[in-house]
Amino acid sequence: MLDKKAFGLALGILWGACIFVCTLLVMWRGGGNHLYLLGQFYPGYQVSVFGAFVGLGYGLVDGFIGGWLFAWLYNQFSRKKK
């Protein structure tokens, strides 16, 4: 069985860090337009230093919810029937 809170927290940290680092890398390299689309899913997000922190927050929450749901579904389907 997977621990839902631990899996959700791990995925939330990973997803938030990915958005944060990718935003800063796109800014540093002069960036393409692909990350601007995240603003449609995460209100307030933009490719900037402030937007990197906004994306970090959304990524933490979004990743936690997705990880928690994945662990819950995994636990439901992996139960042995009597």
Image (cartoon, helix red, strand yellow):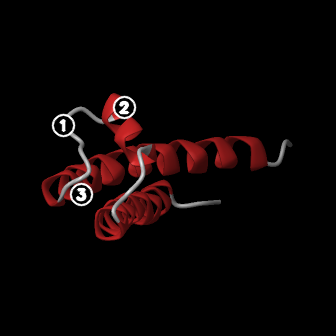
Label of residue 41 in the image: 2
Q: CB of mark 1 within 8 Å of CB of mark 2?
A: no
Neighbourhood count class around disc 1 (C-alpha, 10 Å): few under 14, some 14–19, many 20 upward: few
Tag 3's secondary structure?
A: helix
Percent coordinates x, y for residue 52 in the rendering: 24, 57
Residue to which mark 3 is pinned = 52
Percent coordinates x, y for residue 40 in the rendering: 35, 29
**Looking at this rendering, what residue extends furthest in the right direction?**
82
Q: Quadrant of the N terminus?
A: bottom right
**Which residue sits at x=58%, y=51%?**
71
Q: Is residue 13 above or below residue 78?
A: below
Amino acid type at mark 3: Ala
**Looking at this rendering, what residue extends furthest in the top direction?**
40
Q: CB of mark 2 within 8 Å of CB of mark 3?
A: no
Image position of 55 (left or right of 14): left
Q: CB of mark 3 within 8 Å of CB of mark 1?
A: no
**Looking at this rendering, what residue extends furthest in the left direction?**
50
- Nearest to the observer: residue 5 or residue 10: 10
Amino acid type at mark 1: Gly
Q: Quadrant of the C terminus?
A: top right
**Which residue sits at x=50%, y=61%?**
7
Neighbourhood count class around disc 3 (C-alpha, 10 Å): few under 14, some 14–19, many 20 upward: many
Residue to which mark 1 is pinned = 44
Percent coordinates x, y for residue 19 in the rendering: 37, 58
Q: Is residue 34 above or below residue 25?
A: above
Q: Distance from label 1 to label 2 (Cα)? A: 9 Å
Q: Quadrant of residue 34?
A: top left
Neighbourhood count class around disc 2 (C-alpha, 10 Å): few under 14, some 14–19, many 20 upward: few
Q: Distance from label 3 to label 1 (Cα)? A: 10 Å
